[in-house]
Each structure stands twice: as structure tokens, then as C-alpha cells.
Image (spheres, rainbow, N blue to C red):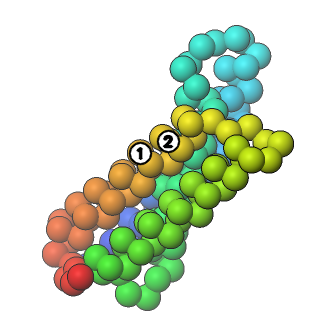
Amino acid sequence: MKGKVKKIYLVIAIINTVLGFISKSCYRDYIYKNNINDFGIADSAPNFFYIIGIVFFILYVKKEVNKKAIKNTILTCSAGVLVYELEQNYTHMIFDIKDVIATILGVIFCYYVSEYLNKKYNLECHD
């Protein structure tokens, strides 16, 4: 069953990376060109999708996936993205709190999906 979960991780990673790319290019362009107010989703959606893609890709390539590895992967990836977002506040780039919120929501999604998959396939997850 472990191989099946790894394949699911890869599928989740690919789907979310593609959705991140689409939301950053096509969707964002459409929203901007047509002056649509989508409450900042066009700007923040890539953060949500990319963090999910990154986390699940790293879980896919890890040899051992247990509760500790999942938590460490999620914390490391989210810390990297959040540091990058906060760094934008001090440089000439644009800081957007909605990006931080989207990243946190993506991380929460990653945690619960990985927990669900581990329970569903009865993987041993030791702390």
C-alpha cells in the first residue's frame, strides 16, 4: 500500500503544480484584463497550489514517510515560503498578507490530506 500512497502524493503534487501555473498565468491575466474583483484570489492562489505541490512532491521522493517526516516537510516548506513572503516586506517587492494566508491554508490542507491517506491505507506513522 505504501507504493499506492506515494503515487497519490505524486498525482497531488503534479495537479497542484499545474493549477498553480494556470492560476499564475491564465487566470490572473484574465482577471486583470477584465477588471474582475475576485478578492485577491488571482494573486494568492499560486501560493496555495504551489505549497501543496512542493510538500507532496517532497513526500513522494522521501524514502521514509512517517508522521515526523510529514510534519518536518510541511514545517520546512512553509517556513521557506513564509520567510520569502516576509522578506518582500523589506525589499522592493510587494508583500501581500493574502499570500501568507494562502500558504498557511495550503499547509493545513497538506497536513489533513496526508493524515487521511495514512489512515486510509493503514500506514504506520510513528512520531
Tell me what residue is drawn at x 64 percent, y 49 percent: 85
In the rendered image, the residue lying farthest to the front is 90
Residue 14 in the image: state x and y as whole percent: 54, 58
On screen, 78 above or below 124? above
Q: Which mark is residue 102?
A: 2
Mark yes or no: residue 36 visible: yes
Q: Which mark is residue 105?
A: 1
In the rendered image, the residue lying farthest to the bottom is 63
- Residue type for callout 2: Ala
Tell me what residue is drawn at x 41 percent, y 75 percent: 72
Displayed quadrant of residue 96: top right
Regarding mark 2 in the picture, which secondary structure is present there? helix
Residue 56 in the image: state x and y as whole percent: 46, 65
For residue 22, side relative to residue 113 (left or right): right
Q: Are marks 2 and 1 in contact (CB under 8 Å)?
A: yes
For residue 126, side relative to residue 102 (left or right): left
On screen, 126 above or below 108? below
For residue 116, side relative to residue 26 (left or right): left
- Residue type for callout 1: Leu
Tell me what residue is drawn at x 38 percent, y 57 percent: 110
Regarding mark 1 in the picture, which secondary structure is present there? helix
In the rendered image, the residue lying farthest to the right is 92
Q: Mark 2 packing: few (<14 Cα in 10 Å), some, or many (20+)?
A: many
The one of 45 and 15 positioned closer to us in this rendering: 45
Residue 32 in the image: state x and y as whole percent: 73, 20
Cα gap from disc 2 to disc 1, whole angstroms: 5 Å
Q: Mark 1 packing: few (<14 Cα in 10 Å), some, or many (20+)?
A: some
